[in-house]
């Protein structure tokens, strides 16, 4: 781990990545990622499979540890504290507390099969945040209404469609009242006709001002909702800018080739 200077967050930034590297053994997956996500911004990460997009998300949530560089969320180093210009990994309970402020939605829904929809959403706020059950139930039902599933509160995940399960997963993440939401290809495991219902929930989140980093191949969503688009390939940022710049008028040949293939 490097000891790059980590001052307090500059006002307005939710995520700051500086020269982030990640290797798994001899395989270097990320080769120096530097980018910023402003508070309230929706950033989409595009690129072919294996380009490092999902690994970058997992680093933000400290599900993986940095090999080099620096990463901060809301002004706090992710997974580390600084003492005498050296970085030390946080203890597990400190990492859990930091992770609780970051919502993450995966390709697979990861709902607890033995719990109802309502119980799935209530579990973490009660068990991790120690919030009162009545308060948590009220918020959970509000969130279910927001994602259009309040009538499914007592259903079990196995009775729901994939799109419904993913909407429950989003509500579950929101129940922790996160500062930041991370989405790792949230529609890739869904049948095509179910994609729209999940994207609509994400669009509503974006309109509400939630800071979001979204790994996706849904170019239409990126064009309509994103404030910024980052195209990654082979562990580096190839091109970044507004949707107009990257999706409509890309400058780099690699980006041009990718966009032409997915549109």
Image (cartoon, rainbow, N blue to C red):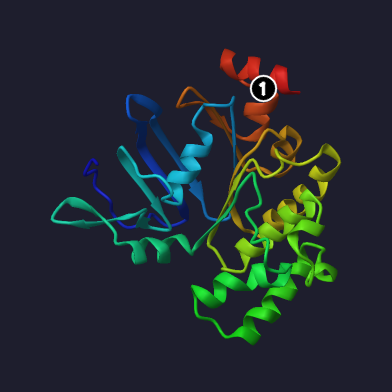
Q: Disc 1 on helix, strand or loop?
A: loop
Of all residues shown, which one is farthest toward the left? 84
User: Image quadrant of residue 214?
Assistant: top right
Q: Would you name the residue on which mark 1 appears? A: 249
Residue 263, how many percent across, how many down? 76, 23
Which residue is located at x 68 percent, y 80 percent? 137
Which residue is located at x 49 percent, y 31 percent? 52
Specify few, some or many for label 1: CA neighbours under 10 Å numbering under 14, 14-19, or 20 or more.
few
Residue 160, how many percent across, how many down? 80, 57
Examine the rendered structure and indicate whether residue 247 appears above or below residue 170: above
Q: How many marks on residues? A: 1
Front-lying residue, 22 or 109: 109
Examine the rendered structure and indicate whether residue 194 appears above or below residue 144: above
User: Image quadrant of residue 257?
Assistant: top right
Residue 167, how many percent across, how many down? 73, 56
Front-lying residue, 123 or 21: 123
Which quadrant holds the N terminus?
A: top left
User: Image quadrant of residue 193?
Assistant: top right
Which residue is located at x 57 percent, y 86 percent? 132
Residue 146 relative to residue 42: left or right: right
Front-lying residue, 26 or 223: 26
Examine the rendered structure and indicate whether residue 182 appears above or below residue 102: above
Of all residues shown, which one is farthest toward the front? 114
Residue 27 relative to residue 216: left or right: left
Residue 62, how many percent across, how many down? 41, 50
């Amino acid at each position: 781990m490097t000891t790059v200077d980590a001052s307090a967050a500059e006002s307005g930034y939710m995520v700051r990545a500086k020269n982030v590297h990640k290797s798994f053994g001899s395989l270097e997956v990320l080769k120096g990622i530097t980018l910023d996500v402003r508070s309230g911004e929706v950033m989409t990460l595009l690129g072919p499979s294996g380009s490092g997009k999902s690994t970058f998300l997992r680093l933000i949530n400290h599900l993986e540890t940095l090999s080099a560089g620096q990463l901060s969320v809301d002004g706090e180093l992710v997974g580390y504290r600084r003492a005498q210009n050296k970085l030390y990994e946080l203890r597990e309970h400190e990492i859990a507390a930091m992770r609780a402020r970051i919502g993450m939605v995966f390709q697979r829904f990861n709902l607890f099969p033995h719990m109802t929809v309502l119980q799935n959403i209530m579990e973490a706020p009660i068990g991790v945040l120690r919030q009162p059950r009545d308060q948590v139930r009220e918020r959970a039902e509000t969130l279910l209404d927001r994602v259009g599933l309040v009538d499914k509160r007592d259903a079990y995940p196995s009775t729901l469609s994939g799109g419904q399960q993913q909407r429950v997963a989003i509500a579950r993440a929101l129940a922790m009242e996160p500062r930041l939401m991370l989405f790792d290809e949230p529609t890739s495991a869904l049948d095509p006709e179910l994609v729209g219902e999940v994207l609509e929930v994400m669009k509503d989140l974006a309109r509400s001002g939630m800071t979001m980093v979204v790994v996706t191949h849904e170019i239409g969503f990126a064009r309509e909702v994103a404030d910024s688009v980052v195209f990654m390939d082979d562990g580096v940022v190839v091109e970044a800018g507004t949707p107009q710049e990257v999706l409509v008028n890309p400058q780099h040949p690699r980006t041009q080739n990718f966009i032409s293939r997915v549109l």
